[in-house]
Amino acid sequence: MTARIPHSHTCFVCGESNAAGLKVRFQTDGEKVWTTVRVGEPHMGYLGISHGGVLAALLDETMGWAPAIHTGRFCMAIELHIEYRRSVPIGEEVTVTGYATDVSRRIWEGRGDIRGADGTLYVRGSGRFMPMSEAATDEVMDMLLFDAGTITREQIVAARSRAKRRSAGVWSDETSKVLSHAPTSTAASRDPAGDAEAALRPADAVGEPRAEGA
């Protein structure tokens, strides 16, 4: 089961009204976050090659969304480590995928990669992210666009409540993911890491926040 993630008007990566932006749309299965994109000539570095800063921005946002799906709170990058393995040709479709690796501490951690349709690894990265407070998260949600087919604001808030119960050591049998009642995507799912059924599994391997962030 997959659903789209809300986007904004102004963001360089996902803003639909940003004339200089990438205008990507993210999807999630409750475990990971991903998008497919073709970097165009306006975002070129050397001739015919996607600019490295643009690729870093894609990984930043994809890795940053992954903890939000688990915790119902947004975050901001405080450290990124990017490893460029191959140049990404302009116009080539690539898939950018992000995962939350640890949300049990004050600073969250994630990882991600950019791969071609044939699985070629172009870029991989990791990051550390400062969680936003619940109030700051709610302010950001006021600026997001929740279209038909996206996870809803209520589902993000519900994920936050479940994360609090898990951090307090209280567990229930209910599905722990924000997608437990999310609308099913009508398009064919691009699932680069496989196992879309993970949307219905608790994230046993991922810790939960013990304290409020920024």
Image (cartoon, rainbow, N blue to C red):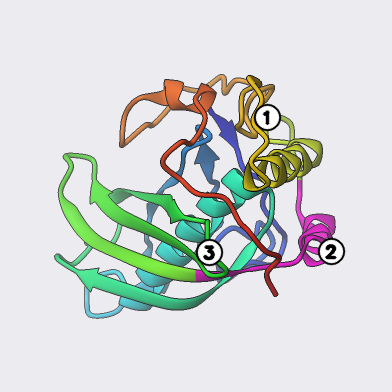
Quarter where residue 86 is shown: bottom left
Q: Position of residue 181 (x, y in %)?
A: 69, 22
Mark 1 or mark 2, earlier in chain: 2
Q: Residue at x 22, y 76 (%)?
A: 47
Q: Position of residue 147 (x, y in %)?
A: 74, 38
What residue is shown at x 82% (from left), y 58% (from top)? 138
Q: Secondary structure at mark 1?
A: loop
| Stretch of the chain drawn in magenta | 129-145
Secondary structure of residue under mark 3: loop
Q: Residue at x 35, y 65 (%)?
A: 126
In the rendered image of this protein, does residue 181 appear above or below residue 155? above
Question: Which badge, 2 or 3, is on the more N-terminal residue?
Answer: 3
- Depth-wise, is mark 1 or mark 2 nearer the camera? 2
206 shown above or below 122: above
Which numbered mark, 1 or 3, is in the foreground of this view? 3
Quickly name the residue at label 1.
149
The residue type indicated by label 1 comes to Gly
Q: Position of residue 162 (x, y in %)?
A: 70, 38
| Residue marked by disc 3 | 105
Q: Are marks 1 and 2 in contact (CB under 8 Å)?
A: no
Crowding at dot 2, Cα within 10 Å, few <14 / some 14-19 / many 20+, comes out as: few
Helix, strand or loop at mark 2? helix
Specify the label residue 135 is tagged with.
2
